[in-house]
Amino acid sequence: MSQVQVLPAVTAFLQRDHGHFINGKMIQADGPTKIDIVNPATEAVISQISLGNHIDVDKAVISAHQAFKTSWAVTTPYERGQKLLKLADLMEKYGEELAQLESLSTGKLINLARHLEVQQSVIFMRYFAGWATKIMGKTMQPSLPSMQGEMYTAFTLRQPVGVVAGIVPWNFSLMIGVWKLASALCTGCTIVLKPSEFASLSLLRLAELSVEAGIPEGVINVVTGDGTTGQCLIESPLVKKVSFIGSVPTGIAIGKLAMSSDLTRVSLELGGKNALAIFEDTNIDEILPRLLMATFVHQGQVCAAPEKFFVHASKYEELVTKLAGALQGMNIGAAMDESSAFGPLSNLPHFNKVKIIWSRSSSAIRLL
């Protein structure tokens, strides 16, 4: 057993009275309601976040709008990129803190949190930083009829839209939050992030690091809460773009709400069913390690994980036998144990959903 010791800085962060990150600092929530953050490996409450209401959301959106009109508007593209690069450096510096916060609150294996979530978040941050100076329009000469010998030139100019609402799921909260934050900031937009109520801690910590990176007050805001908090955010008249990753039913509801709220721009990346095909000439021994990784990384709680296998009849028994043997040999354990290969499901609602699916399984289904 190689249990990772929780850093003192992480323990101190968990014990804080968490409000919201608005206008460059943590502030107390308007309402008294708290949401428990539960370690899915132990079922112990390790921290609490605040349930944001419309007053909290209004403060965050106004802060982002003011920053968009003032400090961020006069920040050059080069300077925007440099600040994002500085934030990436700080994420690297405090990477173990961020990884432990993710692991403790979501059940993500600590090695996955370190080497995928945090490291890829740093890479994505630097990628978007590079785009800050490469956003440009086009010029053209349209073929319009000339009345008196005049010539025409047309051009496009790309401009930031304003305040972006980023609604983030629980499976990769830090990394997906970085996608939304960095892509918005490199274009000149400002952002209000609403993380999942099950996975808010790493993004609250990231927001604090943005101050050290020199990002102006109000450019990044984080309001914690549940679906009602997200609804308040989408309905705000100052929000000009909504970006959401999550389930199809929630995405449909968000799309409808955004359209009814002054035709707010919306981007939806929704769940799907991924298929994997195994052909007659497939070498099962060769693909098995990759198949296990793709299917069961983060306990299968990944949008890209294959959920349906289409197997050539000649390979069926070999695949089932070898897959069952490999699964039986997986080390199931705590997320903070470096030797674990499979950890807990991330939260109770998801656990109950899986139990319902399991209970509906036909008796004719062969379990591995």
Image (tube, rainbow, N blue to C red):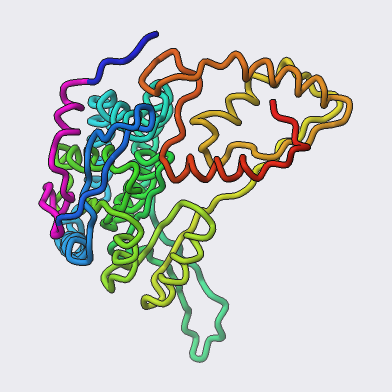
User: Number of labelled discs?
Assistant: 0
Answer whether residue 133 is visible to the viewer in this image: no
Answer whether residue 110 is visible to the viewer in this image: yes
The residue lying at 23 percent from left, 57 percent from top is 52
Q: Which is nearer the eye, 149 or 31? A: 31
Q: Quadrant of the C terminus?
A: top right
The residue lying at 65 percent from left, 26 percent from top is 291
211 up-or-down from 191: above or below: above
Residue 339 falls in image quadrant: top left
Q: Position of residue 205 (x, y in %)?
A: 22, 38
Q: Which is nearer the eye, 307 or 243? A: 307
Q: Quadrant of the N terminus?
A: top left
Q: Residue furthest top?
A: 1
* Left/right of residue 306 with respect to residue 155 in the rendered view: right
The residue lying at 60 percent from left, 49 percent from top is 272
Residue 314 falls in image quadrant: top right
Residue 63 falls in image quadrant: bottom left
Q: Position of residue 309 (x, y in %)?
A: 73, 36
The magenta stretch is 7-31
Q: Position of residue 239 (x, y in %)?
A: 30, 67
The residue lying at 32 percent from left, 55 percent from top is 226
Find out whether residue 188 is within the magenta segment: no
